[in-house]
Amino acid sequence: MTEFFQTGMGRKFYERDVPKLAESLATIAEQLARLNLNIEKLNENMNNPEQAD
């Protein structure tokens, strides 16, 4: 029986789909980190309105 990675769909999955998925996950992680920083800044500004930028 042919292994999945030896099929055309398997090669596409490992060579194209998995790397694209990893890139997408990295982008999501970057955006979540930026969102968290913005939320932290908003919380700081709400707690200390006189020091807001």
Image: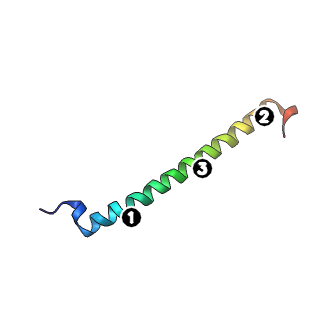
- Give the foreground label among 3 and 2: 3
Give me the residue at 79% from left, 35% from top.
Answer: 45
Quadrant in the picture for residue 49? top right
Position of residue 32 in the picture relative to residue 2 (left or right): right
Say which amino acid is labelled 1: Arg
Secondary structure at badge 3 equals helix
- Distance from the alpha carbon under mark 2 to that under mark 1: 45 Å
How far from the left and from the top, in percent, is residue 25? 48, 52
| Residue for badge 3 | 31
Quadrant in the picture for residue 16? bottom left
Say which amino acid is labelled 3: Gln
| Residue for badge 2 | 46
How far from the left and from the top, in percent, is residue 35? 64, 45
Q: Are marks 3 and 2 in contact (CB under 8 Å)?
A: no
- Give the foreground label among 1 and 3: 1
The residue at the far bottom in this view is: 8
Secondary structure at badge 2 equals helix
For residue 16, which numbered disc appears in the image?
A: 1
